[in-house]
Amino acid sequence: MVANNYKRVLIAGAGPVGLVAAASLATAGIPVTVFEAASGLSTESRASTFHPPTLDMLGKLGVVGDLIDQGLVAPTVQYRTKADGAIANFDFGDIADLTQHPYRLQCEQYKLTRIIARRFASDPNLTIEFDAQVQEVQQDSAGVSVRIARPDGSTERRAGLWLIGADGAKSAVRKSIDMAFEGFTWPERFLVVSTSFDFLRLFPDLASVSYVADPIQWHFLLKVPDMWRVMFPIAPEVADEDASTREYAAETLSRQFPAAAGSPINHVTLYRVHQRVASLFRKGRVFLVGDAAHINNPLGGMGMNGGIHDAINLCSRLAKVWRDEADASELDRYDLQRRLVTLEHVQKQTIENKRNLEARDTKDQVRFRDEMRQTAASRELARKFLMKISMLASLERAEQLG
Ligand SMILES: Cc1cc2nc3c(=O)[nH]c(=O)nc-3n(C[C@H](O)[C@H](O)[C@H](O)COP(=O)(O)OP(=O)(O)OC[C@H]3O[C@@H](n4cnc5c(N)ncnc54)[C@H](O)[C@@H]3O)c2cc1C
């Protein structure tokens, strides 16, 4: 089937996960072509949190220094309730023995993709083709091929040894290999408003990463270098056209924070949010990574980070098989480890985060506050908690799976 097969890995999608996979393979000396449907790298902010182990991984690819330079180091994370203010602070310094980066880096995901593209621009092993939409996949025991569509309507087939589907939540690769993507969609949408209003004027003790529980309108406040990002849930009865306007965002912001009324609003984005996981992350020579394999709500900042962990896990195995240091069964471990960890950690944790912030039942609210306070008060519990929210625990669990 794959007549023009040659030794190369194909990647669909030049988002943060696809480019980390490409950088990882190129660093291992493996030639890779990334096909990106758009005419350039995405300018969307979306993810703004990089967790400590993700930064460690990016360090090995030689891109973490530039990322840190363009981001904001957040050494603590804070949990608040609207009624009581800060209820718990956690300091990543408590897990400084477990990571080279004991902090969350607040930095928009579009900065990472640009840093990788620049860093690998002259690497002969890494090619990015824009205006190249992957439409359909075929594979046999020798290789894999994809149909690429160009904006002028032309198509061509391209071949390689393996294909990594990093083409996001609506993945054409996932659909082409007929992989189910089960889960559910939350009834509310999430509205992200970026503003240069200085929230420290209102809450002098506010951390750069703060989650605020409230039964009426929970929210998060996340600082990136030159602005704050505030995220609110939007009730199902509000139409998309209304909720995505600057006027609606300004009104929502000032209702919650009257002092912020009239403040500059830099961006407004409305997201529909899902919890879904592909039935398998591997089918023969085709692998799913990142949002193509799993999607979750953004509370805890785990989607892109988990995707980067997928990419690193998979590419280290592909490199071993490429160099004949392992047989193809090595690749099954990718699905075994990453899929289970996605279900046990990322899906569970992000759903729990949302439930805790939005709790309406007084018993649940009290339980959350008490648990947070007790956890922050004990170094041992705080370390365990930090390992969980920084995703170190999920990586440890993946390793235990062998
Ligand atoms: C409001 C919000 C905040 C978030 N915050 C965080 C956070 O702080 N931390 C975190 O870890 N995660 C966060 N996430 C999740 C994060 O944005 C995603 O998990 C991440 O973008 C996934 O990266 P990806 O590379 O898998 O997919 P994408 O970023 O979706 O990239 C996919 C790429 O593939 C391209 N593509 C699509 N179809 C094709 C095709 N057929 N052929 C070729 N190319 C194609 C697209 O153009 C795109 O460039 C957040 C999400 C939202 C909505």
Image (tube, helix red, strand yellow):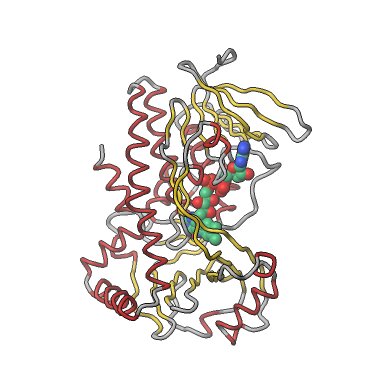
Residue at point 45%, 54% (across, down)? 275
Q: Is residue 392 left or right of residue 40?
A: left
Q: Position of residue 209 (x, y in %)?
A: 45, 69
Query: Number of numbered discs present?
Result: 0
Residue 85 place in picture, x, y as percent? 41, 83
Whether 41 is drawn above or below 197: the answer is above
Residue 158 in sight from this viewpoint = yes
Looking at the rendered image, the quarter that the N terminus falls into is: top right
Q: Specify the quadrant of the image occupied by residue 302.
A: bottom left
Q: Is residue 309 above or below residue 381?
A: above
Instruction: Decide if residue 145 is on the left or right side of residue 205.
Output: right
Residue nearest the viewer, comparing 161 with 237: 237
Residue at x 39% of width, y 85% of height: 84
Q: Residue at x 60, y 78 (%)?
A: 253
Residue 140 in the image: x percent, y percent? 49, 18
- Is residue 48 among what the camera can see? no
State the image coordinates of residue 400 (x, y, percent, origin top left).
24, 42
Which residue lies most toward the right here? 152
Nearer to me, 119 or 287: 287
Q: Is residue 273 shown left or right of residue 345?
A: right
Residue 107, compared with residue 159, is above or below; it is below
If the image is split into quadrants, where does the C terminus sit? top left
Q: Nearer the viewer, residue 70 or 282?
A: 282
From what the image shows, is residue 12 above or below residue 389? Answer: above
Q: Residue at x 57, y 79 (%)?
A: 198
